[in-house]
Amino acid sequence: MSTVLALETSCDESAAAIVSGRRVLAGAVASQMEEHARWGGVVPEIASRRHVEALPALIAQVLEQSGLAMADLDAIAATVAPGLAGALLVGSVTARTLARLHGKPFLGVHHLEGHLCSVHLGEPLPEGPYLVLLVSGGHTELVKVEAPGSYLRLGRSRDDAAGECFDKVARLLGLGYPGGPAIEAAALDGDPGRFRFPKGRVSLPQGGFHPYDFSFSGLKTAVLRQVQTLSRQAGSLPVADLAASFEEVVAEVLVERSCRCAVEAGLQTIVLVGGVAANRRLRRHMSEATAARGLGWRVAPLAYCTDNAAMVGLAAIERFDAGGRSGIALGVAARLPLEQAGTLYAPQPPF
């Protein structure tokens, strides 16, 4: 049973965890949320600085919590792609330095593979092949998982990710950052049927629409126009109704296309992961829709939906136990398709 120290610094959460098998022995997160909220979104330079400041204490904390020393670890891992390049570099350099100092193997982890593995931190485990709806601040993708490390993307957002759209609409409504929790709280007392916003579709060159891809830029624009119209007419906004109507259409489109994709691909289970997977309306719609179609569904434990180091550690363990090792010269990349996650363990680093 391998034991790994994992670091996650892909965006605005500094995180460290020690994972052994499928057990999280210790985990710690230093959130930058309040600082970035002042600017209405993540400021990359600030994020990188805070990672530098936070990681030493986080690493010391998880070692103390777990009762382990560096000598007890089998490997050290860090997220290396995709994400904010400067932020990724902080975690990667820290992990590689520790690996060299203590003579441990290093594993560079794909952030999205971490999210895919997050469902394995709960029970029961999904049996492959299955479809994953990965929906977060930076990504909205439908991924067929055949087995660990074997992925096929069947759908994606062509513009804004769903979580990004939540942030932008929250700003339009004068709500806080991050937008997901702010809109969910505002929508509790709202009427989800008062405003009918569009379910953006992606046109195909030969005509018709892509059955599984998403587009959220038109939805964002529709909310903006509705806000402008209401502001001119009434001077005040029915924020709760706007939030509920927006949240409703996002949940509907995510679930409808996920279910269609699963049925047409012959997959019996849908797995929901990523920060937006914490949304209760989305979970409710997914539960109802899969039951109506005779599908099963799983969701990552709530504590591991948003960015965290435990999921990175589990992804690293699966690669490590299969013989994967990353070169100590491996760098970081702001973008890397999930299908290329295996190149992080190739003899010649991809970057």
Image: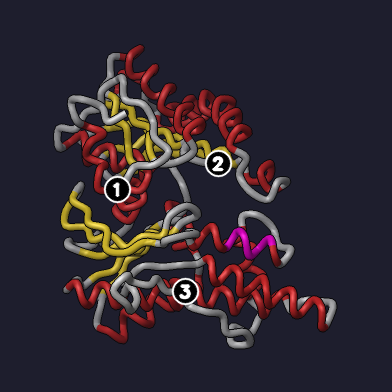
Residue occupying the point 28% across, 19% down: 104
Residue occupying the point 63% across, 76% down: 188
Q: Nearer the viewer, mark 3 or mark 2?
A: 3
The vertical placement of 123 against 328, above or below, is below
N-terminal label among 2 and 1:
2
Marks 2 and 1, how far apart at CA: 21 Å
Q: Which x, y percent locates residue 65? A: 45, 32
Could you say whether the residue bearing mark 2 is in a helix, strand or loop? Answer: loop
Q: Which x, y percent locates residue 204? A: 33, 71
N-terminal label among 1 and 3:
3
The vertical placement of 32 against 219, above or below, is above
Q: Quadrant of residue 213?
A: bottom left
Q: How many marks?
A: 3
Our reading of the magenta stretch's main secondary structure is: helix
Marks 3 and 2, how far apart at CA: 29 Å
- Identify which amino acid the numbered label 3 is placed on: Gly
Q: Is residue 155 magenta?
A: no
Which label number is shown at residue 200? 3
Marks 1 and 3, how far apart at CA: 24 Å
Could you say whether the residue bearing mark 3 is in a helix, strand or loop? Answer: loop
Say which residue label 2 marks: 12
Label pair 1/3, CB-CB below 8 angstroms:
no
The vertical placement of 231 against 121, above or below, is below
